[in-house]
Image (tube, rainbow, N blue to C red):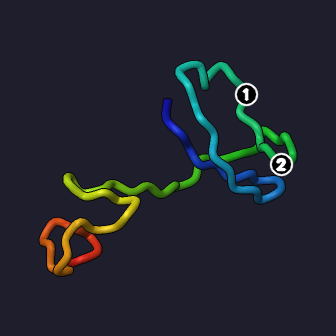
Amino acid sequence: MPVYTYVCNDCGEKFDLLVGVTSKKAKLKCKNCNSTNIKKAFGSFSVGAPGHNSSSGPSCSTGTCPTCPTCF
């Protein structure tokens, strides 16, 4: 199930919701004030390069790896 970021139009709270297949039937509401006056916002995500462990940084030791996002 995807996670979407929403913003409440009433209180301004920004929050994430895990939205399932039945989301059109369910009333989505703000976690802060329970308002249903919310809108979907742009969220961010990251994708790690194959062969690199994103939690510990680049696996190269020279700092010039062509596939590592922190080296180029």
Q: Position of residue 58 (x, y in %)?
A: 27, 68
Q: Left or right of 71: which side holds 27?
A: right
Which residue: 76% across, 53% down? Answer: 9
Marker disc for residue 32 = 2
Q: Position of residue 43 (x, y in %)?
A: 52, 55
Above or below residue 36? Residue 50 is: below
Q: Tell me the kind of residue under disc 2.
A: Asn
Is 36 above or below relative to 70? above
- Left or right of 19? Residue 52 is left
Q: Position of residue 54 (x, y in %)?
A: 35, 59
* Residue positioned 69% across, 23% down in the render: 26
Q: Name the residue rendered at 59%, 35% in the picture.
A: 18
Q: Which mark is residue 27?
A: 1
The amino acid on which the numbered mark 1 sits, given as a three-letter code, is Lys
Q: Quadrant of residue 28?
A: top right
Q: Is residue 14 left or right of residue 59?
A: right
Q: Closer to the camera, 68 or 36?
A: 68
55 versus 17 height, above or below: below
Q: Residue 3, located in which quarter of the rendered image?
A: top right
Element at label 2: loop
- Extreme residue in the front direction: 61
